[in-house]
């Protein structure tokens, strides 16, 4: 394993998750449908399914994944899906609050945490420190890959699915817009929602209030939250993951 791959793995293991909470909230559903927005290589869906397979008697798993960075090799997840009989539907479009074509930016120095329609990391101190950690002996130039991507509203899938149990959104600062474009599908299926809020420190409280207010307006309450400690080290960026559940 290369130095960079080892660091990616370490940071992934240090990232917060709600697997135990999700497992308890799913109860005895026979089938599970996951919308994984900000899929990258699929670690969220893969790790959650592996845990549920150990603890739950679930007969079918379906994953809808969304990742506009089409340079990613998803062979590992494909092999996992084949081996574990997961129905996998992958899309290279982005999700947002309108159907349109927009600019998508990939920070090639750190693509797992730097791919977004609203990239707030480009001029951040966070990126400069990550650049040094991951490539300490290379030049400090920030490499960007900007391309046009098709953006769809989450509600476009309203008539294409019969269930939605878990909606995970990890899109580096664009979560609010995705939720805006998914009001109808969320209200219909009432999934558990794991959503990342990533923001510059001076705007973080405002962004949390805005997102919480939107979800409250459609019947959701905050269940729990967890801080990304690796994002806070020597950083001008704050990142929390939130778990929202339908209000009883």
Image (cartoon, helix red, strand yellow):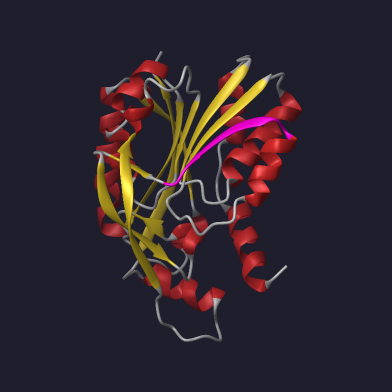
Magenta residues, as a range?
84-92
Classify 181 as above or below 74: above
- Residue at figure coordinates x 48%, y 19% from the top left: 163
Q: Is residue 243 above or below residue 188?
A: below
Position in image of residue 171 (x %, y %): 40, 49
Q: Residue at x 29, y 37 (%)?
A: 211
Quarter of the image for residue 104 reads: bottom left
Q: Closer to the camera, 5 or 144?
A: 144
The answer to whether one can see residue 121 in this image is no
Residue in view at x 27 percent, y 34 percent: 180
Does the segment drawn in magenta span residue 88? yes
Which of the pair 203/40 is nearer the observer? 40
Q: Is residue 114 left or right of residue 137?
A: left
- Tell me, yes or no, if residue 243 can be seen here: yes
Asked whether, in this view, residue 147 is left or right of residue 71, the answer is left
Q: Quadrant of residue 21?
A: top right
Question: Looking at the image, is 8 positioned above or below residue 86?
Answer: below
**Residue 132 location (% of width, % of height):** 50, 78
The spot of residue 159 in percent (x, y) is 38, 20
> Which sits in the foreground, 45 or 221?
45
């Amino acid at each position: 394993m290369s130095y960079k791959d080892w660091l990616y793995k370490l940071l992934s293991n240090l990232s917060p998750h709600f697997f135990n909470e999700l497992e308890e909230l799913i109860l005895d559903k026979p089938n599970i449908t996951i919308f994984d927005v900000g899929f990258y290589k699929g670690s969220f869906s893969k790790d959650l399914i592996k845990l549920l397979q150990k603890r739950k008697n679930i007969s079918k798993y379906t994953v809808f994944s969304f990742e506009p960075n089409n340079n990613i090799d998803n062979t590992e997840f494909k092999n996992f899906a084949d081996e574990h009989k997961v129905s996998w539907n992958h899309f290279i479009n982005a999700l947002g609050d309108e159907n349109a074509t927009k600019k998508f930016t990939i920070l090639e120095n750190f693509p797992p945490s730097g791919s977004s329609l609203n990239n707030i990391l480009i001029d951040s101190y966070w990126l400069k420190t990550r650049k040094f950690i991951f490539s300490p002996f290379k030049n400090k130039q920030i490499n960007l890959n900007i391309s046009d991507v098709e953006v769809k509203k989450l509600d476009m899938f309203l008539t294409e699915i019969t269930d939605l149990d878990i909606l995970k959104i990890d899109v580096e600062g664009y979560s609010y817009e995705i939720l805006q474009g998914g009001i109808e599908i969320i209200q219909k299926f009432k999934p558990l929602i794991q959503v990342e809020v990533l923001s510059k420190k001076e705007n973080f409280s405002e962004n949390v209030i805005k997102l919480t207010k939107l979800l409250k307006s459609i019947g959701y309450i905050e269940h729990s939250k967890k801080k990304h400690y690796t994002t806070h080290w020597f950083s001008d960026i704050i990142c929390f993951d939130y778990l929202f559940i339908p209000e009883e």
